[in-house]
Amino acid sequence: MSNTPSLANGRHYLAIPGPSVMPDRVLQAMHRPAPNIYTGELVEMVAGIVPDLRAVARTRHHVAMYIANGHGAWEAALCNTLSRGDRILVLGTGRFCLGWGEMATAMGVEAQVIDFGQRSDIDLDRVAEALAADTEHRIRAVLAVQVDTSTSVKNDIPGLRRTLDAAKHPALLCSDNIACLACDEFHMDEWGVDVMVTGSQKGLMTPPGMAFVFFNDKADRARERADLVTSYWDWRPRANPQEFYRYFNGTAPTHHLYGLRTALDMIVKEEGIEAVWHRHAVLARAVWAALEVWGQAGPVRPNIADRAKRSHSVTTVNFGPGNGKRMRDWMTAQAGVTLGIPLGGVEGPGGNAEDFLRIGHMGHVNAHMVLGVLGSLQAGMAALGIPHGPTGLEAAVKVIAEG
């Protein structure tokens, strides 16, 4: 590292794939005295949060809110739909669906795993084969992530529904949208998703601490036979509370709710979810354009080769031998930007985790923020002597200009 004085002093930018940048308005909404949790403004406000959560997920069905992170949402989805000894089909495209399956196994559920590796999306033909082989319909649920934040792959969730329907298989379709809700386009009802889980800390622009499980009536019917459900994780009283206290099976996450209300105002009422999707799509294409030009004369490679299979919320990149760590260190020390570390064996057999970094472009981000990250990355490659096509930033600028 150079002994040149750092240029990082100033407002630091956390460009990791979650927790995302929190809007000042959200933080200011949370900075207030504790409210009454039994009557008054908080109770009235939460009643309005539920319809806006449904609007983001594009569903008319149920939503249960929890004081938890994404792993809590995983457990809630599993325990409300499954019993010990049930079988599920786990479709691994990175660390997180595999982790969801491991949780199910620890709960006494049999997980049939198809691991598609660290560079690929779900192969629907292989899923069709697995469903066809399940002639007794022992598989109760199919678990997938729409976006795996370790690999940055985006899976074809409506394609999974078509595959299940073609096989005439009754399994629930369960989608993990923790990394991508309110970033990548998602239509829960239109796509035939039965259960969807997410968290507050990424596209929903609220600090970590809240988790959400969206579920339809078919999934709720599975609750009738589920022997894993417990009092705390039971989604029924949360989705249809007879009193406010039951929304959270105890004290509400009061200040998170004020922040979430403001975030939903920004997403649903002000920008609009379609415009949010468009913004993320353009910013993602700007990132990809820069990476692809840099890679024309150097080692830089997006982890997912096919643009159509890349997430609009996070991009995992191989910068070449050891260069991922070198770039992360330089960006923090010299540019005031923190990038994401690699997760979950993304390097693959014979690879090196130090080659990789992850760029978060989710939530409260705009053109100048993304261009700042890309300009800093280009400066870092020049400073560290990493070969690269010299006009990557210009390629990103062109994408932004075209909108």
Image (cartoon, rainbow, N blue to C red):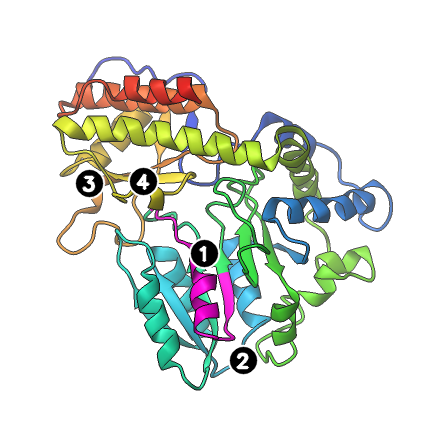
Give the SS element for disc 4.
helix
Q: CA distance from mark 3 to mark 1?
A: 30 Å
Residue flagged by tag 1: what amino acid is it?
Answer: Ile
Packing grade of label 4 (10 A; few <14, some 14-19, many >=20) is some
Q: CA distance from mark 1 to mark 2?
A: 25 Å
Residue 314 covered by magenta stretch: no
Q: Nearer the viewer, mark 4 or mark 3?
A: 4
Image-quadrant location for residue 116: bottom left
Image-quadrant location for residue 188: bottom right
Image-quadrant location for residue 264: top right
**Horizontal and vertical percent for residue 269?**
68, 33
Residue flagged by tag 4: what amino acid is it?
Answer: Arg
Question: According to the image, label 4 marks what residue?
Answer: 307
Q: Nearer the viewer, mark 4 or mark 2?
A: 4
Question: According to the image, label 3 marks what residue?
Answer: 355
Residue sitting nearer the eye, 315 or 274: 274
Q: CA distance from mark 1 to mark 4?
A: 16 Å
- Please say if the residues under marks 1 and 2 sit with CB atoms less than 8 Å apart: no
Residue 156 covered by magenta stretch: yes
Packing grade of label 2 (10 A; few <14, some 14-19, many >=20) is many
Question: According to the image, label 1 marks what residue?
Answer: 157
Q: The C terminus appears in which quarter of the rendering?
A: top left
**Span shown in magenta:** 152-174
The residue drawn where x is 32% and y is 23% is: 374
